[in-house]
Amino acid sequence: QVQLVESGGGLVQAGGSLRLSCVASGIISNVDTVAWSRQAPGKQRELVAAMSGNGRTNYAEAVKGRFTISRDNAKNMVTLQMNSLKPEDTAVYYCNRRLRSGDDYWGQGTQVTVSS
């Protein structure tokens, strides 16, 4: 069993920054793919950023150049640095971890609200 706990959400003005963190516990591996997704009210959940076990990253077009995903395997932590935030970034952000087995685990989500 894997548990993911997110933190770092909150309210920020447009143009500001937030840093989300996700700490994992359980049977995890450095080769797991880690990712952040978000879901705005009335919209489907969408992938924001992902990082494979070899460090390759993938970003949604809407956040390229503004968001950065990183991982600290020693701390079992994944972070999402979000800069130049826009009102349209408002959503619940979820941490996700896909194990080598293909099993997916999700955190409980953390609210990010960007005011204009």
Image (cartoon, rainbow, N blue to C red):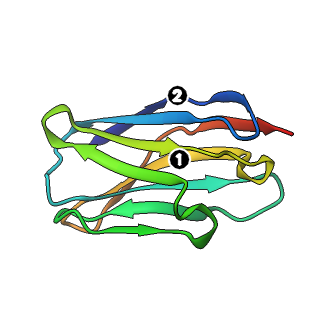
Quadrant containing the C terminus is top right
Q: Are marks 2 and 1 in contact (CB under 8 Å)?
A: no
> Residue type at mark 1?
Tyr
The percent position of residue 59, horizontal first and vertical second, equals: 48, 67
Instruction: Determine crowd level at label 1: few under 14, some 14-19, many 20+ residues with C-alpha closer than 10 A.
Output: many
Mark 2 and mark 1: Cα distance apart in space = 11 Å
- Left or right of 72? Residue 17 is right
Residue at screen point 55% across, 54% down: 66
Quadrant containing the N terminus is top left
Residue at screen point 49% across, 34% down: 19
- Residue picked out by circle 2: 8
Please tell me whether residue 18 is drawn above or below residue 97 in the rendered image: above
Number of the label disc, if any, that sits on residue 30: none
Residue at screen point 74% across, 48% down: 86
Q: Could you say whether the residue bearing mark 1 is in a helix, strand or loop?
A: strand
Pick the residue in front: 14 or 71.
14
> Residue type at mark 2?
Gly
Between disc 2 and disc 1, whose residue precedes? 2
In which quarter of the view is residue 58 placed?
bottom left
- Left or right of 87? Residue 107 is left
Instruction: Determine crowd level at label 2: few under 14, some 14-19, many 20+ residues with C-alpha closer than 10 A.
Output: some
The percent position of residue 12, horizontal first and vertical second, equals: 71, 30
Q: Could you say whether the residue bearing mark 2 is in a helix, strand or loop?
A: loop
Pick the residue in front: 90 or 26.
90
In which quarter of the view is residue 3 placed?
top left
Number of marks present in the image shown: 2
Q: Residue furthest right?
A: 116
- Residue picked out by circle 1: 94
